[in-house]
Image (cartoon, rainbow, N blue to C red):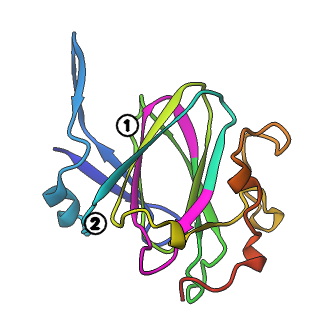
Amino acid sequence: MQLNVLPLSIADVKLIMTSRMADARGYFREAYVRSDFVAHGLDCDFVQDNESSSSRAGTVRGLHFQKPPFAQAKLVRVLCGKILDVVVDLRRSLPSFGSHLAVELSDSGGEQLFVPAGFAHGFCTLEPNTVVLYKVDATYSPAHDHGINWADPALAIKWPVAPEDATLSDKDRKLPMLDDLSPVFD
């Protein structure tokens, strides 16, 4: 497998590209080979795969994270459609605390985003019928599940949908602003 790991503007978040072999049938890709990821310094023991399907463009999921000791690293990819994937650094001890980055991921591009623990993560669908798959290195724990409000003006995220037009869960509408969040990752 040809694995390209590209650094992004916030330390430890990586854009991952894998090679794709195409022929008349379609294509084949080895999306995850543990030994190749470890060779690039991405040594996570992924224990759970999560998949979401969103029927409408403009669906926002996030910004979610789990508190320690169930904090999760994630490996995110799109199986069908396209998203704007967003992470917010919640590591208070770093100068990048509160900053975000956004990257488009699509089924046609085959990009993956590696998000280490210590970040809130969310995305907005850019096409209808979008399916997202992400691996996590800690199982879901309702007691440790948390998030920050996707539309927090202090984050200055340029979402591709206005708040009044976004499709959201009730839970995500009620998430606190970053300034109201107690320290989680020091």
Say which element carries label 1.
loop
**Residue tagged 1:** 110
Q: Residue at x 62, y 54 (%)?
A: 62
Q: Position of residue 143 (x, y in %)?
A: 53, 72
Determine whether, in the image, residue 105 is placed left or right of residue 137: right
* Residue 28, label in figure: none
Q: Residue at x 42, y 28 (%)?
A: 108
> The disc labelled 2 sits on which kind of residue?
Leu
Q: Distance of mark 1 from mark 2, alpha carbons? A: 18 Å
Q: Quadrant of residue 137?
A: bottom left
Determine whether, in the image, residue 60 is placed left or right of residue 131: right
| Residue with the most extreme front position | 143
Q: Is residue 64 magenta?
A: yes
**Are the residues tagged 1 and 2 within 8 Å (C-beta)?**
no
Q: Magenta segment, which residues? A: 63-84
| Dot 1 or dot 2, earlier in sequence | 2
* Residue 42, label in figure: 2
Which of these two is toward me, 145 or 83? 145
